[in-house]
Image (tube, grey):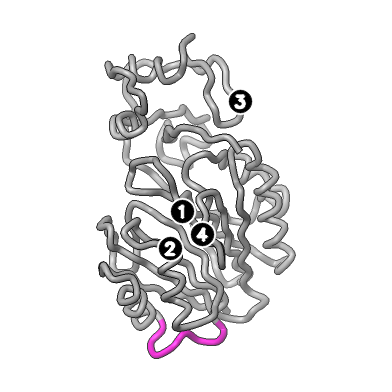
Amino acid sequence: MLRFTSASVRIANTQRAVDECIEIAFGEKVPEDCGVIMVNAAIGHKLDKVAAAIKTHTDTKILATSCGGVVGREGAGEALTHLAVMGVCGPKQEHAAAAVDGVYATNAYEKGLELANALKEQSGKINIIYLICPGLDINCDLVLQAFDEVFGPDVLIFGGTSADNYKAVTTFQYLGETLTEHGAWAVGLADETLCGAARASHGFVAYGDPMVVDKAEGNRIDSMDGMNPLQAYTSRLSMLPEDDPKVSFLAAGALAKELPPELAKEYRSPHILRGLSKGEQE
């Protein structure tokens, strides 16, 4: 049976923040059966320095992601110095961890398959998966499609994407030994005593007349309402396009995509939020 232990702190010094998290989460030392330590860190902490600090306590595998805030057992925090860790401990056959680098929207399905297969090779009995993808140029629908093909539709998948401080400049992931901006990682749990329910809502209310996507490829919109999508979006908000408008339109809002009735009932909202970001080429 798996055990989970976690901690979060608000401390500027990275080594001190890690030391306190380790003490709160594990006590005197990290147990030998701890298979992976997951890190969620606001951008005031560099993930490679967080990993180096953890390695002073243990050689357990480390997977980390940047974010605009953390949620720990002590509550939520959005200060730049917030740091949260969680350890997964228990029999080796009941947990698995894997990571891939070089993930972009153009290869999301292929990288999703690579990651899912790497996880399944470690355990064929995984029933819950925690999945973290890069936060900007990514087609998560294709990653999830790949995971469904490998594990089947009954395996619960939850998680999210990396973030920065809401500037949409870059996001970071730490993949065991590598710091990257385009990595994805997953932790699989193979414990039949576990069950879970995943639900998310951004608390938004959609307004205005619908806009129509005329042309799109994957997660990239090429034309909306017969115009360049950025032009259509900014004109709807009475904004003037800028040379680099990412911060402006991210602060102003996002797109709401209408859901089919069955998904709207499950999500408890008629729309799902779709964030906007500038795509990158591989």
Residues under labels 1 and 3: Cα distance?
A: 26 Å
The residue carrying pointer 3 sits among few (fewer than 14), some (14 to 19) or many (20 or more) residues within 10 Å by Cα, namely: few
Left/right placement of residue 22 relative to residue 188 reads left
Occupied quadrant, residue 40: bottom left
Disc 1: which residue: 172
Question: Label 2 is placed on what type of residue?
Answer: Leu
Disc 2: which residue: 47
Q: The residue tagged with tag 2: helix, strand or loop?
A: helix
Task: Give coordinates of residue 220: x percent, y percent.
Answer: 54, 28
The dominant secondary structure in magenta is: loop
Residues under labels 4 and 1: Cα distance?
A: 7 Å
Q: Residue at x 51, y 59 (%)?
A: 179
Residues under labels 3 and 2: Cα distance?
A: 33 Å
Disc 4: which residue: 179
Question: Label 3 is placed on what type of residue?
Answer: Glu
Disc 3: which residue: 217
